[in-house]
Amino acid sequence: MIVDCTLGGGGHTSSILKKMKALHLNMKHRVLGLDRDPDAIARAKIRFENEIRCGELEVVHSSFSQGLAAVNNRPIYGIMADLGISSDQIDSETRGFSFRYPAPLDMRMNTHNDNSLADLLATITETELSDLIWKYGEERFSRKIARKLIDLRSKNEFPKDTLRLADAIASVFPPPMRHKRMHPATQTFQALRIAVNEELLELEILVQKILPAVHTGGRIAVLAFHSLEDRVVKETLRNQELYSLPSRKAIQASDEEIEANPRSRSAKLRFAIRK
Ligand SMILES: C[S@@+](CC[C@H](N)C(=O)[O-])C[C@H]1O[C@@H](n2cnc3c(N)ncnc32)[C@H](O)[C@@H]1O
C-alpha cells in the first residue's frame, strides 16, 4: 500500500490514485490517507466517497506518529509526508493559524484532544517562550516579543484573538520594520504553531518508525517547508543504511512553479529508496 501521511485537501492522494489507475495496478486497499485534523478527514470522506466505497482508499484520523497502527502490518511500497499546514487550515477564520482574522488562540491541528495556543500561553515562562520563538521561528526579536506577551499576561491584558496577538507582537518591532512585505508576526506564528502541534517531535517519530517498515524497493518522500523540518529529514536519511539516496540534494520548485504557486517557494522534497 501507499501511505499519504498528510491527507489535507487530498491533492496528493488524488494524484496517487490516478497514477495507480493509469498503471492498471490492483487498487484494492491501495492507499491509506492519514490526517490528525478531523475537519480534513471529514472533507476527504466526502471528496473520496467513491474511492472509499470501492475499497481503493482508506481514510484514518491519526497523527502520523501513530499511523503505523492503521497500516496493520500490510506491506508499504510508498510513503509520502507533505509537512506543515494546509491551505484549508491557514485560510480558516476560526482555527487560529492566521492573523488575517480575529480567530481564537487555538492553532491545534487535532481539535479533539491536544492543548491549544491559549493553553500554552497561559502557563509558559518568559524564558521558555523566548527560546521557543527563537528555536522554531528563528525570530531575532524573540526576547522582546516574549517579554511583551508575558507582561500583557501579568496585567491581565493578554490578546484574546490572533489579530490582537499579531498586533502585540508587531508592536515590539522598530516602526520601519512593521510595514515590510512579510508581517512581523509571521515567524512567531510559525514558532507557536510548531510548538502547539509538537511538529518536530512528530516528524522525528515518523521517520524513525517508518524507515524500517517500508518494503524493499519502496520509497519514502518528504516535503518540508522550513529548514528545521528539512534538517531532521536530511540527517535521518543520510545517517542510515537501509535506504539509498538517488540524490543528496533536495528537489525544489522551478521558477514557473513558484510563479503559479508562490507557496512552493520554500518547499524541499527529499526521497529515498529502501534497499
Ligand atoms: C501541507 S498539508 C497537506 C496537503 C495535502 N498534501 C494536499 O494535497 O492537500 C499538511 C496536512 O498534514 C496534516 N498533518 C500535519 N502534521 C501531521 C501529523 N503529525 N500527523 C497527521 N497529520 C498531520 C495537517 O493537518 C494538514 O492537513
Image (tube, rainbow, N blue to C red):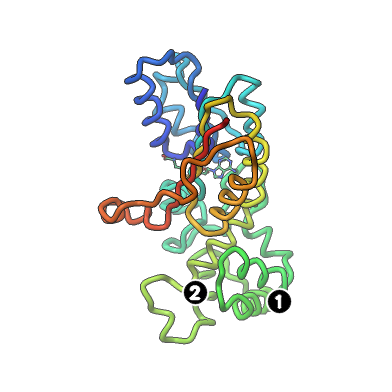
User: In the displayed structure, would residue 180 be above or below residue 174?
Assistant: above
**Apparent side of residue 119 relative to residue 192 in the rendered image (left or right):** right
The Cα–Cα distance between marks 1 and 2, rounded to whole angstroms, is 18 Å
Question: Residue 167, labelled with which disc?
Answer: 2
Q: Amino acid at mark 1?
A: Ser
Q: Is mark 1 within 8 Å of ligand 1?
A: no
Give the amino acid type for the residue marked by disc 2 in the picture. Answer: Asp
In front of the other: 217 or 254: 217
Q: Can you give x and y, in whole percent of width and height, for residue 94 in the image? A: 48, 52
* Residue linked to disc 1: 154
**Quadrant of residue 165 in the image?**
bottom right
| Image location of residue 185, percent across then percent down | 49, 70
State the SS at label 2: helix
Residue 29's tag is none
Neighbor class of circle 2 (other Cα within 10 Å; few <14, some 14-19, many 20+) is some
**At which x and y percent is residue 113?**
67, 43
Dot 1 surroundings within 10 Å: few (below 14), some, or many (20 or more)?
few
